[in-house]
Image (cartoon, rainbow, N blue to C red):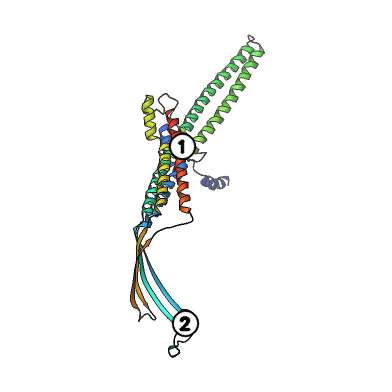
């Protein structure tokens, strides 16, 4: 009977999760590709690319199809045309139907502001990609630091285990010496106290190792209780990188490759281009629009009609909103210049 009850419980028990063997390089690679912060940064680049397409849509043609059925009456006196008595129309005009179906199209021929907005959106997208690179670098650095702390904690646990084993052997030796009458009881007490201290330090070291492994899991976007096996150990060659040894060469490489500096430069360029786009809104805008369709009192009697329009728009005044937006972008560009200069000083220091 007991076996029948235990069988379903055994079948329902979840299979143990396989331990993940993780080297230092694996941890850095996973953090750079699959960490949650990297995924979020990648989605932000997709958002920036979508904004580029949104800005470009102002330069592309638009096409629509419309169908209308209208039934109405109206007051002839509201037309403002006095009709002679012999030509008097009934007032109000009796209800009548009107059917209209047409295709409408619109195309911008010249709009320098929209062209500038597309360029600014592309620069902003480049900045977002540079920010993603900064996020990838930060995520990899976080994972690398967590991995190093974990293997250091593992080494500390091994050392504490050795200390505990030595302390246990000293207790055994002190007990034997006391039993042989060649050692006082105080030596045994001292050895037991050392064993308790060693076991306490071992417990603390194991707790620190557990916390360090949780930090590794979180840095990689894994479950906190995911079983990990860290395959690397503390070594002088661990985490070595091919960087210039000379100061000037290292600074030049950092100025060329630091993603945070590239992102800041892109933000400043995007602000300047956005300001130029707002200033370009003062220029005339030229577009052509047209429609073609059928119109009539009944569907069988409908006839084809068309409309073609060429329109030039010249902005005059918008309550100085345009000027305020230009000032805002100029301030953002100056702010970015200050941050970029500060980053350069940090790199050169």
Residue at disc 2, secondary structure: helix
Residue to which mark 2 is pinned: 76
Name the quarter where the C terminus is drawn.
top left
Dot 1 alpha-carbon crowd within 10 angstroms: few under 14, some 14 to 19, many 20 or more? few
72 or 68, nearer to the observer: 72
Q: Is residue 207 visible?
A: yes
Q: Position of residue 203 (x, y in %)?
A: 58, 28
Q: Which residue lies at the image location 47% right of the left edge and 43% below the top edge?
A: 331
Residue closer to the observer: 69 or 229: 69
Q: Nearer the viewer, residue 225 or 346?
A: 346
| Residue 108 position by quadrant | bottom left
State the residue position of label 1.
338
- Residue drawn at x 57%, y 18% is 169
**Which x, y percent locates residue 149?**
49, 29
Visible residue check, residue 35: no
Mark identifier at residue 250: none
Q: Position of residue 300 (x, y in %)?
A: 35, 81
Task: State whether residue 259 is above or below residue 5.
Answer: above
How far separated are the C-alphas under marks 1 and 2? 69 Å
Residue drawn 54% across and 48% down? 8
Which residue is most to the right? 185
Residue 102 higher or lower than 137, as above or below: below
Other residues around mark 2 within 10 Å, as few (<14) / some (14–19) / many (≥20): some
Q: Secondary structure at mark 1?
A: helix
Residue at the bottom extreme of this rendering: 86
Answer whether labels 1 and 2 touch (C-beta < 8 Å). Answer: no
- Left or right: where 232 falls relative to 161: left
**Mark 1 vs mark 2: which is more N-terminal?**
2
Mark 1 vs mark 2, foreground winner is: 2
Residue 284: x, y in percent?
Answer: 37, 57
Task: Determine whether 104 is above or below 168 in the image.
Answer: below
Query: Up-down: is 37 above or below 112?
Result: above
């Amino acid at each position: 009977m007991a076996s029948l009850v235990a069988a379903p419980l055994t079948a329902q028990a979840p299979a143990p999760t396989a331990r993940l063997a993780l080297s230092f390089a694996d941890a850095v690679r996973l953090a750079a590709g699959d960490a949650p912060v990297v995924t979020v940064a990648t989605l932000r680049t997709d958002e920036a690319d979508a904004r580029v397409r949104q800005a470009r849509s102002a330069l592309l043609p638009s096409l629509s199809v419309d169908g209308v059925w209208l039934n109405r009456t109206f007051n002839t006196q509201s037309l403002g045309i006095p009709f002679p008595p012999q030509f008097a129309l009934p007032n109000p005009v009796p209800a009548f139907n009107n059917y209209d179906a047409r295709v409408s199209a619109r195309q911008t021929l010249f709009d320098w502001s929209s062209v500038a907005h597309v360029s600014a959106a592309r620069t902003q997208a480049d900045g977002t990609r540079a920010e993603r690179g900064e996020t990838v670098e930060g995520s990899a650095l976080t994972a690398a630091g967590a991995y190093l702390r974990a293997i250091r904690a593992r080494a500390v646990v091994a050392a504490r285990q050795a200390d505990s084993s030595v302390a246990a052997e000293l207790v055994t030796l002190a007990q034997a010496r006391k039993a042989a009458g060649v050692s006082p009881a105080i030596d045994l007490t001292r050895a037991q106290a050392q064993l308790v201290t060693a076991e306490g330090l071992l417990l603390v070291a194991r707790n620190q190792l557990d916390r360090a492994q949780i930090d590794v899991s979180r840095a990689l976007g894994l479950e906190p209780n995911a079983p990990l096996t860290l395959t690397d150990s503390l070594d002088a060659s661990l985490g070595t990188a091919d960087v210039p040894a000379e100061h000037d060469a290292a600074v030049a490489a950092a100025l060329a490759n630091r993603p945070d500096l590239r992102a800041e430069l892109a933000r400043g360029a995007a602000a300047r281009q956005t300001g130029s786009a707002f200033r370009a809104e003062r220029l005339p805008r030229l577009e052509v629009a047209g429609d073609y369709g059928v119109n009539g009192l009944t569907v069988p009697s409908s006839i084809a009609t068309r409309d073609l329009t060429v329109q030039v728009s010249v902005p005059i005044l918008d309550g100085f909103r345009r000027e305020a937006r230009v000032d805002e972008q100029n301030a953002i560009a100056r702010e970015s210049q200050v941050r970029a200069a500060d980053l350069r000083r940090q790199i050169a220091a």
